[in-house]
Amino acid sequence: MTVDVAILVGWQENYFYYESGYEDDTLNHDVEEATEFLDLNADLVRDLEAWDAEYQATYNPIDDRKSGFATAEAERDWIERGKELSARLKRESPMVASVDYLAWGNIPEGTCVF
């Protein structure tokens, strides 16, 4: 069995979306669930977590309108790292059929698929 995965980051949210086939599946999975179900290696998980932590650090809980990357270059770099990680996820997980990388929703669904 393989699954199609979407990577969609949100502040204080899980970023793995896939159908596990289990009853009552929410489609949104935390890192621990995804690590086990998708058979992810520790290096990839560490890199995904660092990438997500970089995004989470842009959140301003006092005024979310002030949230976001400090520069356009930092934002572009983060987006590119996410693409690389999505390609790695597809390559390295025996459970992943495809990865639809959406960043934080700024990449339209189905336009960046590995």
Image (spheres, grey):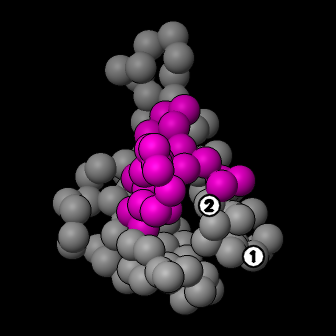
Q: Position of residue 104 (x, y in %)?
A: 37, 48
At x 69% / y 64%, what residue is drawn? 35
Q: Is residue 52 left or right of residue 80?
A: right
Q: State if disc 2 and disc 1 touch (CB < 8 Å).
A: no
* Mark 2: secondary structure: helix
Q: For the residue labelled by badge 1, is the local secondary structure a helix, a strand or a loop?
A: loop
46 to 25, vertically: above or below: below
Q: Earlier in the sequence, mark 1 or mark 2?
A: 2
Left or right relative to 36: residue 18: left
Q: Answer few, some or many: residues within 10 Å of disc 2's Cα (few below 14, many 20 plus, some between 14 and 19).
A: some
From the viewer's perspective, is residue 12 above or below residue 72? above
Q: Residue at x 44, y 74 (%)?
A: 3
Three-letter code, disc 2: Ala
State the residue at coordinates (22%, 62%). Answer: 109
Residue 74 lies, in percent from the top left, at 48, 54
User: Residue at image x 57%, y 38%?
Assistant: 56
Which of these two is toward me, 42 or 21? 21
Magenta stretch? 5-33
Residue that carries the numbered disc 1 in the rendered image: 41
Q: Nearer the viewer, residue 19 or 31?
A: 19
Image: 83 above or below 10: below
Classify mark 1: residues with Cα within 10 Å, few (<14), some (14-19) or many (20+): few
User: Depth-wise, is mark 1 or mark 2 nearer the camera?
Assistant: 2
Observer-nearest of 18 and 79: 18
Q: Position of residue 71 (x, y in %)?
A: 43, 46
Q: Would you place residue 87 above or below residue 5 in this image?
A: below
Residue type of the residue flagged with mark 1:
Asn
Residue indicated by mark 2: 34
Nearer to the camera, 36 or 101: 36
Main SS, magenta region, reads: loop
